[in-house]
Amino acid sequence: MLDFMNAQWRTAEMMLDAQTVVGLRMLGMAGVRPTDPDENLRMVTEKQTAFTQSGIATLGAMLAGKTPIQTYDLALAPIGRTTRENSRRLVEAR
């Protein structure tokens, strides 16, 4: 039960970070806040990398016989890491 609750918490953190990233990027696109000229390209390429890493982790966990919650944790890790890093980077960039 605790594993499930921890997974829910990590999912909520990732979703909050993702909303922060979306909001800050939209402000940058609108010209309200300064932004790196490569931010739009980064926005696309980082997703490809994170989701590829997530898929590989998922497949590896399933083939290793991990439980569903362990598999979910491994799948969420690269996506959560990417959103967390982006959120911190964009918040600090002023």
Image: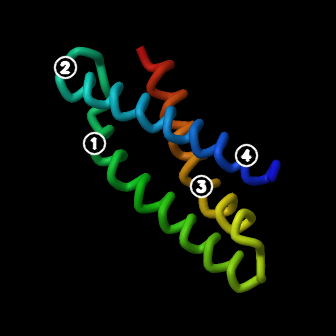
- Residue at label 2? 31
Residue 67 versus residue 20: which sits nearer the camera? 67
**Secondary structure of residue under mark 2:** loop
Image vertical order of residue 90 relative to residue 73, above or below = above
Cα–Cα gap, marks 3 and 2: 30 Å
Which residue reaches farthest bottom? 63
Amino acid type, mark 4: Met
User: Which mark's residue is nearer the viewer, 1 or 4?
Assistant: 4
* Circle 4 residue: 5
Mark 1 Cα-neighbour bin, 10 Å: few <14, some 14–19, many ≥20: few
Q: Are marks 3 and 1 in contact (CB under 8 Å)?
A: no
Counting residues from the start of the chain, the first of labels 2 and 4 encountered is 4
Q: Secondary structure at mark 1?
A: helix
User: 4 and 85: which one is in front?
Assistant: 4
Question: Which residue bears the numbered disc 1?
Answer: 40
Under circle 3, the secondary element is helix
Which of the marked residues, 3 or 2, is nearer the chain's N terminus?
Answer: 2
Does residue 66 lie above or below 19 as drawn? below
Separation (CA) of disc 1 from disc 2: 13 Å
Which image quarter holds the C terminus?
Answer: top left
Residue at x 60% of width, y 56% of height: 76
In the image: residue 76, left or right of residue 46: right
Q: Is residue 55 above or below residue 18?
A: below
